[in-house]
Amino acid sequence: MDVEEKIKKMDESLKNRATTAMLSEMRKDLEKKIADIQEMIDSKSGERGDEINKLREEIKEIEGKIQEMKKSSMSLQDDISLLRKYFLKYEKLQKRVKNMEDVMGIEEDINVNKIPPSILRLVYQYTLNDAIDMLRKYVGPSESERIMKYVLQDVRTRTSGTELFKLVNGKIEARDIEKAIKKKLISPKQIHLTYIEIINKIREYIPGFVPKNFASLLRTKGQEYAIETSTENRIRIEMLERNIENMRGEMSYQENILREDISEIKRMIEMDIQNTANSLSERISKVEEMVSGLHDEMERIADTIKHMFPYISSLRGQIYSKIMEDIPPEGIPLENLEYPSEIINDFLNEEINRGNVILQDNVVYSTEKIKNRILEALEEKSLSFSKLRKELGYEKEILVTVLEWMKKEGLVEEKKYGKGKKYKRR
């Protein structure tokens, strides 16, 4: 294959890359929506069997057409027209499934693991806003904000996931739920339990208030989400059609320019290849001479480093010990450690891995000094976790971590105390 053919193939690849990628994305989106409808139909009871079978047949027909589109060699314009047709069929199928649900009824038990996180967040926010608006009407803005702060603090002591519900501008906002579930930081079920705890605590301050039906809202928001997604796909198809038309004119212009430049580019490439080959041959000879001369020097440097290593290791240990001494029992902000950043970074990497240092919110703590303070506090008495935390002033996560280490080392003993725990020295 000569240079002219290579350039022509590169040009055609550039022409088709954007449109082919967008078309592939829309196909995948349509396949996912069809799979969701299939799963919804399969989850229904055996009633209205004829209608369900018809829907299944129509879904299989659309899936078959999509597979044919993948295997066929139609133009992008034809593929886009067919996709538009199948998106319209999908919307009709969705309406028929909704009508069937209205007649058959939908199971009220909710498996939040199967609900898209974005829809869960929308419903959480909607119901929370409804409850907060009612709370404001009942107790007033200032008192409602105080109650919400208390509710979040109370729920935080009994369940995880409250960090996803934050008080912002006088309202509890559901935030970062999709990100937390995607990264598997917390399960949808745990988030839902936390949400229920928050709603139930708010209800205690609103006599007679009944939240809106959660399952019904999930259906409504899910339908709105599907309609918005379908609309976005139609807009993307229309934009793609316009882009294709614009690109045709641009491609024709660029093609003429490329044809004019191909012969000149070919000549320049051949000259560059010849010049580069000659230059590389000379440089390789020089590099071989330099490598031969550097080999002995590198061996001498390696021998010097080998002899210096014990001294460097000892010096580093002394520096680490001095840094550890400079960390007070209550911790010290990272920027207040007056050492070069490279030394601080190496120190933190090694000592955190060894469990000698804890870094939280850019504050450095000495594990050993925290242990000593805990042992002093438990010298002649046992204390609950909350009292121990209040007396020492450490964050909950830090105190929990160090107490767990001390339990494993046999320094403290943990006993249940009502709903909480008490700690004493061994």
Image: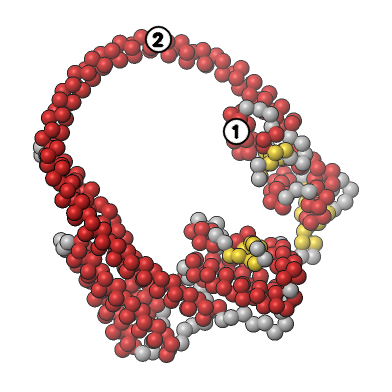
Is residue 173 rendered to the left or right of residue 294? right
The residue to which callout 2 is attached is 296
Q: Quadrant of residue 274?
A: top left
Q: Name the residue type under label 1.
A: Asn
Q: Is residue 282 above or below residue 169?
A: above
Residue for point 12% across, 39% down: 260
Q: Quadrant of residue 299?
A: top left
> Residue 389 location in percent, x, y?
78, 52
- Between 287 and 320, the residue placed more toward the observer is 287
Check contact, mark 2 vs mark 1: CB within 8 A: no
Residue for point 67% across, 82% down: 209
Q: Which mark is residue 289?
A: none
- Between 424 and 349, the residue placed more toward the observer is 349
- In primary-sequence order, the first of circles 2 and 1 is 2
> Residue 178 location in percent, x, y?
51, 61
> Residue 48 location in percent, x, y?
36, 90
Q: Quadrant of residue 373?
A: top right
> Residue 115 location in percent, x, y?
48, 70
The residue to which callout 1 is attached is 345
Q: Quadrant of the N terminus?
A: top left
Distance in Å between CA atoms under marks 2 and 1: 34 Å
Residue 141 shows in this picture: yes
Q: Is residue 397 above or below residue 92?
A: above
Is residue 103 rendered to the left or right of residue 394? left
Residue for point 77% across, 45% down: 411
Q: Name the residue type under label 2.
A: Asp
